[in-house]
Amino acid sequence: MMHQLRALIERGTSIFIDHIEYRFLIRIQCFIADLPVKALLLKTINFNGRNACTYSLSPGQYNNNLRTMLYPYTLNNYQTRNHDDFVRAAKRVAADAKTNGKQVFINGIKGYSPLLDILHYPFSIIYDYMHLICIGHVPTLIRRWRQSESKADLALVDKNLEELHLPHNCSIKFKHPLANVDDWKAKHGRIFVLQVGIPVLVDAIRPLYLAHFSIYSVAIILLHSPKNTDEIELADKLLHYYCLNASRVYDESIELYSLHSHLHLASQVRLHGGLCFHSAFAFESCIRYTQKRAHGTRNLH
């Protein structure tokens, strides 16, 4: 199957209609997955490794006190990975592992993936905003607010969420309070960051947290479906400012790879369009639709 895809990409395919030949070239736009699956299929180190960034050569720095790998903003290396260099390194790693029987790494690469034959690294390897933001960074922020804010303030946010009056075509209810944010679904994180987060947090959490989150929310809104390149550029600046100050607003433990990944979202949107057009939301909706269409237990594939 992989060889067939590669052949279609390189040579295309032809069909004849009314004695006229039409030639089609196939292009794979992007590969959508969460960080662990991406690392597994592309044979790179996991998201908590030193060279986990799939877009740039920014290195991680192990924090002995926290016992985790951090990606401090001040250590960012904005040199973009190169597909040909990546392929050469992957083949070298695979050859060395076969010869010596030992696992070796080159800039986070630990083997040769067949996906490299049909994808262009790193531009086709995108960050899925459903996993990165809606069920990733948004719940992370809420957990930090839970640790710092009073029970009364958190109860006010829960009350504001419960009393939301959303449009009739938006069938989302916040049945779970902030204390149970782990029970939120991706759709809750999406509507929180895109629409209701800032209003329900006003006068409920400390101004520093609100201001910092507001910068983040505006940046994601702009990248979700940008109207022009100016909005993408503004979102890029906002995310850099957000990531720069994240450790000052909270502490250094927030500077994980998942936060660093946000710095590459603007570049991704320039290549592939708004975040809403290339996320796992469409696939998740398709899965739910297919499940609803299935009846009985026979001939299920």
Image: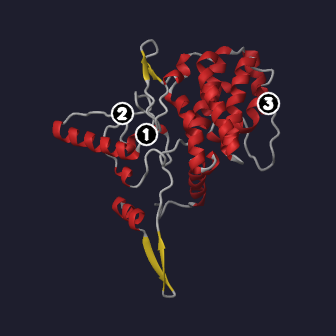
Position of the N terminus by quadrant: bottom left
x then y, percent, for residue 251: 58, 15
Q: How crowded is mark 1: few (under 14 residues within 10 Å), some or many (20 or more)?
A: some
Q: Is residue 14 above or below residue 279?
A: below
Gap in Å between the C-alphas at discs 2 and 1?
A: 10 Å
Question: Is residue 219 or residue 185 the one in the foreground?
Answer: 219
Q: How crowded is mark 2: few (under 14 residues within 10 Å), some or many (20 or more)?
A: some
N-term mark: 2 or 1: 1
Residue on which the image places disc 3: 199
Is residue 176 visible to us here? Answer: no
Q: Residue at x 61, y 56 (%)?
A: 289
Gap in Å between the C-alphas at discs 2 and 3?
A: 43 Å
Gap in Å between the C-alphas at discs 3 and 1?
A: 39 Å
Position of residue 125 in the picture relative to residue 132 (left or right): left
* Callout 1: SS: loop
Please report contact status of discs 3 and 1: CB closer than 8 Å, yes or no: no
x then y, percent, for residue 202: 79, 24
Position of residue 171 in the picture relative to residue 38 (left or right): right
Query: Which mark is in front, 2 or 1?
Result: 1
Q: Residue furthest top?
A: 65
**Which amino acid is tagged 1?**
Arg
Q: In this view, does 20 lie above or below 96?
A: below
Res 143 quadrant in image: top right
Residue on which the image places disc 2: 107
Query: Which mark is in front, 2 or 3?
Result: 2
Disc on res. 81: 1
| Colouring convention used in this rendered image of the protein | secondary structure
**Which amino acid is tagged 3?**
Pro
* Callout 3: SS: helix
* Callout 2: SS: loop
Q: Residue at x 36, y 33 (%)?
A: 107
